[in-house]
Amino acid sequence: MGNALKNVMIEKESGNFKRTEKRYPTMPGLEGYRKIEKIDGVIYDMSPSASVGHGIINCNIHSSISSQMKDRVCRVFMENLDFYLDEDEWLVPDIIIVCDPREIKNGRYRGTPKFIVEILSPSTARRDRLLKKKKYESAGVEELWLIEPKGRSLEIYYLRDEKYELEETYLLEEDKENEDYNADARIRLRGLPHISMALADIFENSEWGSGN
């Protein structure tokens, strides 16, 4: 068994923040590989893997955006582009759209993304909502989506006067007999209005493999 990776996390306890550590074994041959974020001097291992539903939603959004980006300068990345805020602080968004390829060097992006998605999970929701959301706001990311897979909800934040404002909140309702039915509602990216997707398409098959 390879060396264990250390997962440093911030948890809130009695109004204060504390650091906790967890260790996960690495696969043989992958001891040197670490998918990590570094925020305010704290390193976070992106392990273990997120849920199957998390991955499916990621793929749904990435596939939809990618298919609508042909012949355009912008590109969409899924968990594979490090967004550097400075030389010693970086984030790994679930989905990120960048339109300035010259800002990508050695796999590191140092520009200002057009759009970011974070898919929440029990182990990362606090970090996504508190730490990362604030960092995206300060970096000038004009549109941020926060998605909760289990509740099938979507929050859309727009940057206004350098602060995020919650513009829209969706809770998927697929029953056409329900007055709140919204599965066909199309969600359009503000900065890239040629890109849109139906709410139902975002969550399509996200319950697959959940064990329910």
Image (cartoon, rainbow, N blue to C red):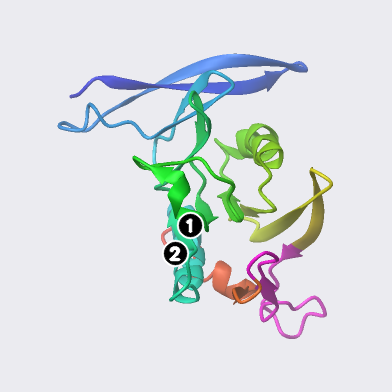
Tell me whether circle 1 and circle 2 mark residues in contact (CB < 8 Å).
yes
- Disc marking residue 93: none
Position of 25 with respect to 96 (left or right) is: left
Count of marks placed on residues: 2
Is residue 176 on the magenta stretch?
yes
Determine crowd level at label 2: few under 14, some 14-19, many 20+ residues with C-alpha closer than 10 A: few
**Identity of the residue furthest to the bottom in this view:** 177
Position of 203 with respect to 35 (left or right) is: right
| Figure quadrant of the N terminus | top left
Is residue 191 on the magenta stretch?
yes
Q: Which residues are the magenta region?
A: 170-192
Taking the spot 61% from the left edge, 77% from the top edge, the residue there is 194
Taking the spot 79% from the left edge, 43% from the top edge, the residue there is 162
What is the magenta segment's predominant secondary structure? loop
| Mark closest to the chain's N terminus, 1 or 2 | 1
Residue 77 in the image, given as x and y percentages of width and height: 44, 55
- Which residue type carries mark 1? Gly
Q: 99 and 131: which one is in front?
A: 99
Residue 212 visible here: no
- Which residue type carries mark 2? Trp
Q: Is residue 179 above or below residue 23?
A: below
Q: Is residue 85 above or below residue 88?
A: below
Residue 10 in the image, given as x and y percentages of width and height: 59, 22
Position of 23 with respect to 153 (left or right) is: left
Residue 42 in the image, given as x and y percentages of width and height: 53, 19
C-alpha separation, residue under disc 1 versus residue under disc 2: 7 Å
Taking the spot 54% from the left edge, 44% from the top edge, the residue there is 111
Determine crowd level at label 1: few under 14, some 14-19, many 20+ residues with C-alpha closer than 10 A: many
Question: Badge 1 is on which residue?
Answer: 53
SS for callout 1: helix
Question: Badge 2 is on which residue?
Answer: 208
